[in-house]
Amino acid sequence: MLQIQGFVFNFASENTYILYNENKNAWLIDPGNMNEQETRAIDLFITEKGLHIRNILLTHAHIDHVMGLQWAFDTFKVPVKMHQEDQEVLDMLQASGIRFGMKIDPVKVDIEYVKEGDEMELDGEKFKIYHVPGHSPGSVVYHNEEQKFMISGDVLFEGSIGRTDLYKGNYDQLINGIKSKLFILDDDTQVFSGHGNPTTIGFEKQYNPFLK
């Protein structure tokens, strides 16, 4: 049985997740920790639970989702999984930092690209990968069909959707992707978003003003 622990980090109140099982194997998703206090919080949780981080997953590479990426890679020495279309976004990290008044070094990590239709496993628990661009060109969703939940990044939020006014954003593309790939899933599928509270597919079908 998989468990999810969320942390709210950095200037954007970004949700970083740790997904783990009874074998103490885990994935670290969207490490957004930006300072010593936040890093200590996530490190303490991993240590106290005795977790083994097997992969670092990115839903996308915007600055608020990768502020702790170099720390995570250096600490756990495991591959970073992301979509190739967001490599350009990750490469813009220094420039993005300047926009927010921060000096950020370019990340040096081992990246393994994922794509639409790929599957990943954590001790037999399968995750399907959906490419849902529009917020960023390489935004992906990680979906566990058996336990009926997804890590959606900034694709879908409670009552909202990801911004589409950023670099290579596309409103129509995002809406179409949500409707064609996510809204066909069971209504009780939980959605763990990149910001804000968890929601469900059924709730968003009924109440999300962007998707009526």
Image (cartoon, rainbow, N blue to C red):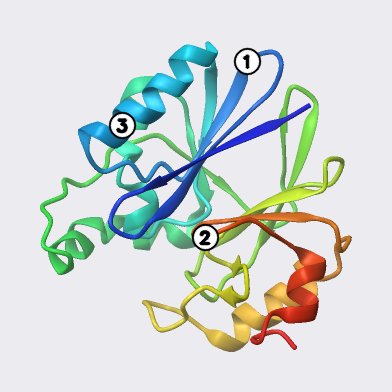
> Residue at the location (64% across, 56% down)?
198
Q: Say the numbered circle drawn on residue 24.
A: 1
Q: Position of residue 83 (x, y in %)?
A: 53, 54
From the viewer's perspective, is residue 124 above or below residue 118? above
Q: Secondary structure at mark 1?
A: loop
Q: Secondary structure at mark 3?
A: helix
Residues 206 and 150: in front is 206
Kind of residue at disc 2: Gly
Q: Position of residue 39 (x, y in %)?
A: 31, 31
Counting residues from the start of the chain, the first of labels 1 and 3 encountered is: 1
> Residue at the location (70% across, 73% down)?
178
Say which quarter of the image contains residue 122.
top right
Kind of residue at disc 3: Thr
Say which quarter of the image contains residue 71.
top left
Say which quarter of the image contains residue 165.
bottom left
Question: Where does label 2 land, which residue?
Answer: 196
Query: Circle 3: is it few (<14), some (14-19), or many (20+) Cα within 10 Å?
Result: some
Question: Where does label 3 land, which residue?
Answer: 39
Q: CA distance from mark 1 to mark 3?
A: 20 Å
